[in-house]
Amino acid sequence: MTVQDQRPIILTGDRPTGQLHLGHFVGSLRSRVGLQDSHHQHILLADAQALTDNADNFEKVRHNILEVATDYLAVGIDPTKTTICVQSHLSALNELTMLYLNFVTVARLERNPTIKSEIQMRGFERDIPAGFLCYPVAQAADITAFKATVVPVGEDQIPMIEQTNELVRRLNRQIGHDLFPECKALLSGTGRLIGFDGKAKMSKSLGNTIVLNATDKDIKKAVNSMYTDPNHLRIEDPGQVEGNVVFTYLDAFDPNKEEVEELKAHYRRGGLGDGTVKKRLEGVLKELIAPIRERRNELSKDPDYIMDILQEGTKKSQIITQATLDEVKNGLGMFKF
Ligand code: TRP
C-alpha cells in the first residue's frame, strides 16, 4: 500500500443555495484547504439535499452549483488533491438512501434536533416535505458511500453525524461485519461567525454576509456598520471587548493574535477609539479577500474549466459510490442475477 492510500477519507459538502461568504470561510473552507494534503478529501455539492427545502426553486440550486464550485477554487481548494462532485449525479446515493430508510424509524427522524429547529425556522409546521425529514439519512448515505471517517462540519451538523453512526452500527450488525467505519465530526474551532450586524449568525437570508468577492467598498461599508460597545462613547472611556463584533472578527481573521490581544487590553483600559480598531479590521479583511476576489473573477471567465472539474470529480465519485452500493446489496443479501 502506498502512503497515499492510508490517508483518512474526508467527505464534506455544502448546499448550493447561494454564494459562499466569510462565515463559510472560517467555518469550513479554511480548514478544507489545510486538510487536502493529509486526507483523501471529497466535497459534495449537495444539490439534491438543497432541494429538500427548495422544491419550488430548482433554478436557484442549479445556478449556484457553479457559483459555489468557483468559490472553492478561489479560496485554494485544489482539484488535483480534492474531488469535487455533484450529488444529484451520484445515483448510488439515492439507492443507498432508500435502503437505509428501512433501518430508521419516523420517531427517530423527528427527534433530530437540527431537523426540529430547521422545521421551526422554515415554518413548515405539519407540512414538512418527506424528503426534508429524511435528509439526515441521505446524508448518512453520502458519508458512508465514500467510507469517510472525518467529516468537517459546523456544530449544527453534529446530530447528522450521530445519526450516521447509529446507521453505521445498525448496518454493520445486519451485514454481519464492519463494512462501514464510524465517522467523527471535525469542528473548525472558531464556531459560527456572527453576521456583521451582530444580531445572528452570518446568513444570506438575513442580509448580514460578506461574500468572498466583496469589493473594498462593500468591506468598508460592512465594517463601518459593525456594532461595538454602546457605552464606549469617548475614546478615553474603557470599552468592552465581549460581544463587540469588531473584536469577534479580529479574533477570527487577524493573523497577528498577539497584537489583537494588545489591542483588546488597550480598548478595555480606555484610550483606543472604535475608528482605529475598525480601520485595522478593514485592512485585514481587504487583504484576505482581495486575492480570493481576483482569482474568482479570473475563474468566472472560464466556466468550461469549472464544468470539466465537476464532471471529472463526479465521474470518479460515481465509481466509488457505486462500489459501496454493490457491497451493501451483497452484504444485505439482496437478489442477484
Ligand atoms: N447538511 C450539510 C449542510 O447543510 C451539507 C451536506 C450534505 C454534508 N451532505 C453532506 C455535509 C455530507 C457533510 C457531509 O451544511
Image (cartoon, grey):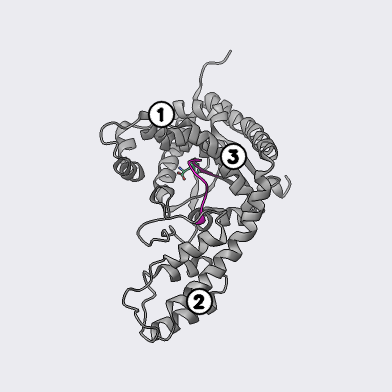
Residue at the right extreme of this rendering: 2
Residue type for callout 2: Val
Q: Is residue 319 above or below residue 249?
A: above
Q: Which numbered circle lies on residue 66?
A: 3
Name which residue lies at 51% across and 22% down.
333
Mark 3 or mark 1, whichever is nearer to me: 3
Which class describes the residues within 10 Å of circle 3: few (<14), some (14-19), or many (20+)? some
Q: Which numbered circle lies on residue 101?
A: 1
Q: In this view, does 11 lie above or below 57?
A: below
Principal SS element in the magenta part?
A: loop
Q: In the rendered structure, which segment of residues is drawn in magenta?
A: 12-22
Which residue position is annotated with label 2? 260
Helix, strand or loop at mark 1:
helix
Mark 1 or mark 2, whichever is nearer to me: 2
Q: Where is residue 179 in the image (x, y as percent from the top left)?
A: 54, 35
Give the left or right position of residue 109, taking residue 218 as reference. left
Give the left or right position of residue 213, taking residue 306 as reference. left
Name which residue lies at 49% across and 32% down.
59
Which class describes the residues within 10 Å of circle 2: few (<14), some (14-19), or many (20+)? some
Residue 216, visible in the rendered structure = yes
Say whether disc 2 or disc 3 marks the residue closer to the N-terminus: 3
Q: Where is residue 63 in the image (x, y as percent from the top left)?
A: 54, 36
Name which residue lies at 49% across and 30% down.
175
Q: Do the residues labelled 3 and 1 touch (CB within 8 Å)?
A: no
Image quarter of the C terminus: top right
Helix, strand or loop at mark 3:
helix
Residue 179, visible in the rendered structure = no
